[in-house]
Image (cartoon, rainbow, N blue to C red):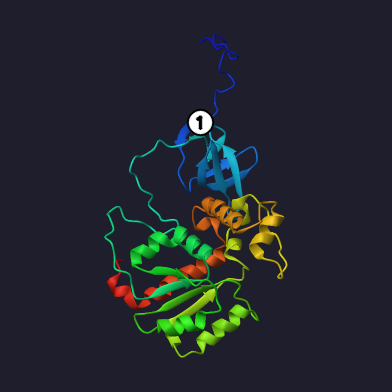
Amino acid sequence: MDRYSADVLGPGWQQRGKPTSRDVALERDLVLEDPSSGFVGAVVGWENGIVLLEDRKGKRRGFPVGPGFWLDGQPVSVRIPARQGAARSTTTASGSRTSSAPTPAKVALPSRIFVEGRHDAELVEKIWGDDLRHVGVVVEYLGGIDDLPGIVADFRPETGRRLGVLVDHLVAGSKESRIAAQVARSGFGDHVFITGHDYIDIWQAIRPGVLGIKAWPSVPMDEDFKKGTLKRLQLPHADQADIARAWQAMLARVKSWRDLDGRLVTEVEKLIDFVTADHLDTLEP
């Protein structure tokens, strides 16, 4: 046997014995590792040649699509998947599973969910709209919390006609908490559920990193929150048109429940469960 006939330094000697990288199409929740930084995260999206990964702590980082990743201990080159025509996502923006069969239109339930403002309603619609249409629940906005006692009295909640309300800045000692307590004493008992969050405005329910900022700026209580926020972010803030444009830009960045503070997600899910509790026998499993 000639042990020295092969040229050990011939072309390709550097790759001998190393694992071969394979080609993998990107998909949501695929867990990848960037070995150069040690960052490990699940795929939450991709755009313009960048794949966005999210780790267990909710931290996100973007990386160029292509080679250089590890998957299940093996090197891979990730690529953007080919378009699938009419293929549908298996989950809604809220994380609920969807059915491949068409869903027939439903008559709206008598029960309702009220939210405090237009921006609240638009955010709820974007994330939970599919779920709400599936169960037949309509979301309406109040335009402010001050008129809530009268609205509840006019609605006259009862069995099968429940009312859920999502309130901004629902913290101890606030005007919102006092109005909520007033409604709780109004005699409608178990047919009204008021919950909320401690943000001054629903804008703050969007995770700062989704918008490319480290944290939401602090705005004094005597200053308009939205204008004050835009001012501190060095964005146009002169009038309502500036606010509307900024909000639409923020809303466009929100793709799923992962982009929101978990506290808001929990409270909205509670509201949906509450207003559908009397109708479970009519809803599909």
Looking at the rendered structure, the number of numbered marks drawn on it comes to: 1
- Residue located 46% across and 59% down the image: 127
The image shows residue 58 at horizontal and vertical percentages of 59, 55
Q: Which residue is mark 1?
A: 21
Residue 216 visible to an observer of this rendering? no
In the image, taking residue 84 as reference, residue 4 lies left or right, namely right
- Residue located 46% across and 72% down the image: 114
The image shows residue 134 at horizontal and vertical percentages of 34, 63
The image shows residue 88 at horizontal and vertical percentages of 36, 48
In the image, taking residue 247 as reference, residue 284 lies left or right, namely left
Say above or below: 51 vs 103. above
| Secondary element at image label 1 | loop
The image shows residue 267 at horizontal and vertical percentages of 51, 70
Mark 1 is on which residue type? Ser
- Residue located 45% across and 76% down the image: 164
- Is the C terminus in the top left, top right, bottom left or bottom right quadrant? bottom left
Image quadrant assignment for residue 261: bottom right
* Between 2 and 26, the one nearer to me in the picture: 26
